[in-house]
Image: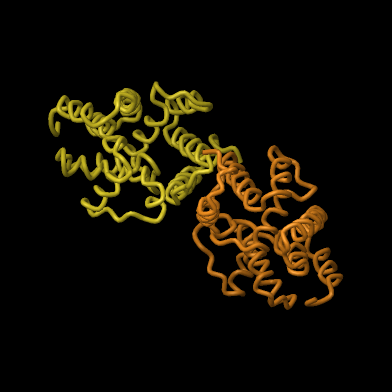
Chain colours: A yellow, B orange
Amino acid sequence: MYFDQDTIRVQLRARQSSTTFAHTLGVVAAAELLAQRYGADSEQVRVAALLHDLARDLETSELLKKAGEYGILVDEIEAREPLILHARVGAAMARHQLGVEDAVVLQAIERHTTGAPGMSLVDSIIYVADYIEPGRDFPGVDEARRAAGQDLDRALLLAMNGTLDHLIRGNRIIHPRTVEARNALLQRLLALKDNRWSGQ
Amino acid sequence: MYFDQDTIRVQLRARQSSTTFAHTLGVVAAAELLAQRYGADSEQVRVAALLHDLARDLETSELLKKAGEYGILVDEIEAREPLILHARVGAAMARHQLGVEDAVVLQAIERHTTGAPGMSLVDSIIYVADYIEPGRDFPGVDEARRAAGQDLDRALLLAMNGTLDHLIRGNRIIHPRTVEARNALLQRLLALKDNRWSGQ
């Protein structure tokens, strides 16, 4: 174990709204189940789930300031929608403020919002758990929950599709990495020659 | 006028299936109305509409071969979904086989499938006409038709959203340019401080 998880919880309560903290505990619960189901390291998954929204409640100005402090290059899309930065800033805070050094954990925190090409097992678990945690209630979430118990990649595709759909309907900017992540996943699924999941 | 449009129609009938040819005539009709409504050059719009699907019925192998002949660099996504190439290959064929030299026309043909950042008036008209032509019948097309009579940018956003939605539901790869095109359009709409169209 890296360090005392009670310490993390105290840190989180101080930094997160009650809504975000409740969501975080839901993600921890969902992620632990997925870690068991798919044989991931439960310690890595738990820490990543606990910390994934560490920077979620920071103001826009604070996100941009911390990005500068941690040497995170802000791209054009992030400059217009700084909220996206909470994933990368959160990973940097976990590393520099809380001393988390495990690259697997830090990467899963970084990737939980846009995803990225080549999602690891832990990346996928955190992304899916964030989408299906018990507090979520929107059309399609139950289908994603069922998929998560059977086929993690299929659940990941549903979560990415649902996230894109949400951004499209809201007329919101889409980070290109979101699409690159989904394209890479489709390529992996195609390479597996497993067409069960495909609507094509 | 560049050249005899009857000649183009003869060329198209020889290269296109009856379905594609009927669709093409629908796009010409819709594009002509939009050209009048928004004050675009009717000649440029008509030629672009006629030729937008010049390469639409080529086989995958033929599309890749012609891309090579015309010096079109095929990216990773196009290599996996060569159908996307019909727009860029079609523009090259219009130029090299039919002698179309007008950059405005060629660009509108090139951009009619993925769109691109910084859509011109003619680009937008062809993209929207392709989406709303009378032969189209899918959920949302009537809303896009109504929008096209009032606000071309809003109709363009609806067409891009609908195109992305279609690709997501079909579990199909999305070309990053599609998302870049939509992000640039959202930025333009935001710069106009016209929030009527926004669902946010």
Q: Is residue A33 visible?
A: no
Report the residue at 65% width, 58% height from top: B124
Q: Position of residue A53 (x, y in %)?
A: 30, 35
Report the residue at 53% width, 57% height from top: B177
Q: Position of residue A75 (x, y in %)?
A: 37, 55
Q: Position of residue A119 (x, y in %)?
A: 37, 43
Residue A109 image-quadrant placement: top left
Left or right, A146 with reference to B72: left
Report the residue at 63% width, 64% height from top: B110
Residue B195 image-quadrant placement: top right
Q: Quadrant of the N terminus of chain B?
A: bottom right
Left or right, B49 with reference to B181: right
Q: Nearer the viewer, residue A17 or B25?
A: A17
Q: From the viewer's perspective, is residue B75 above or below residue A35?
A: below
Identify the residue at the far front of this view.
B193
Left or right, A195 with reference to A63: right
